[in-house]
Amino acid sequence: MAGSRTLVEFRKLTLDSLKVGEEFVSDDHLVTPEDIEAHGFAVEDDHPWLAEGVAPPTLMANQALHLRHSKYIVHAGLHARMEFNFLEPIRLGMRVRTRGKVIDKYERRGKPYMVTEYVTEDESGRALVRGQFTQMIIPEPEASHGHAR
Amino acid sequence: MATRVDIETKVGQALSSLVKDISQRRIDVYSGVKPRSIHSDEAWARQKGFRACLAQGMMSTAYVSQMMVKFLGPSFASGGTMSMAFIKPVYAGDRLTVHGIIKDKQSDIGATRVVVEVWVENQHGEKTAVGHATGLVS
């Protein structure tokens, strides 16, 4: 029976509401043939990843980028910077998750930004990809509603 | 442990460039179709000040990764690095060209790390993303 778990309380993402040091963790994701095929179509990658049983190195990048959605209502945002350190290949059939931590927030030219470090790991906790990324926060205007990306 | 490949590399050498036509269909598959998304909801993208739906910057990292894999092989996934800044929006309908030039070769634990300056240009010759990627060779 459901109901004993704590529900996530989502907050609207603003520079003020964001906490430096806050940690995120994604759900586990099973890397499927469909993931690799869809990625190949989306970015026109004809490398035979499926035949090799390996995923393209950036396959799980959006799992990292979406970490903030696990705690915040994100009105809109723009991706400013992305860094990857590819440590081990992500393989077909792996269950992977990404952990992240907000390491900085700042305002530049009137625009708010947040910086998150992340690690994507397999079920045993072995790190596959590490890095950090910077996202601009586009806060919800006072009069509008919704939770768009 | 990183895999190393044995290939000829020279500082100043250009990597084979890639050309990508950015369709809304491919953006949809990459980002998912959602209401109030600047990637898949054109009215919302316009409301946010853009002339059309935007491709995720992350798609450009996939293109650079693809260029590096064509250069180094799949070993880019074990020991490779990439750092990119997204400096201009990429819109549905744009044509991108992905470029790379070897800028440096550095000693790295018994191997050589090749440092490649990378950038992505749109059909107007404007840079949309810039950065560098590295990988190990014997």
Image (spheres, coloured by chain):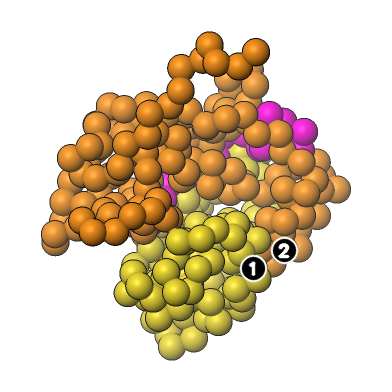
Q: Which mark is residue A20?
A: none
Image height check: is A96 above or below A34? above
* Left-right relation of B134 to B69: left
Q: Which residue is mark 2?
A: A41
Co-location on one chain, circles 2 and 1: no
Q: Disc 1: which chain? A: B
Query: Where residue B83 sits in the image (x, y, percent)?
Result: 42, 52
Locate the C terminus of chain A by quadrant.
bottom left
Query: Where residue B94 sits in the image (x, y, percent)?
Result: 52, 81
Query: Where residue B48 sits in the image (x, y, percent)?
Result: 34, 69
Marks 2 and 1 in Cβ contact (< 8 Å)? yes
Residue found at the far bottom of this picture: B124
Write down which chain is painted yellow.
Answer: B
Please report the residue visible at 43 percent of the width from the left and 26 percent of the height from the top.
Answer: A8
Please report the residue visible at 68 percent of the width from the left and 56 percent of the height from the top.
Answer: A39
Locate the N terminus of chain A by quadrant.
top right
**Residue B78 sits in quarter:** top right
A86 is within the stretch colored magenta: yes
Query: Where residue B135 sits in the image (x, y, percent)?
Result: 55, 48
Write down which chain is painted orange.
Answer: A
**Residue A117 sits in quarter:** top left
Q: Which residue is mark 1?
A: B26
Q: Over which residues does the magenta segment extend?
A: A79-95
Please report the residue visible at 50 percent of the width from the left and 57 percent of the height from the top.
Answer: B58
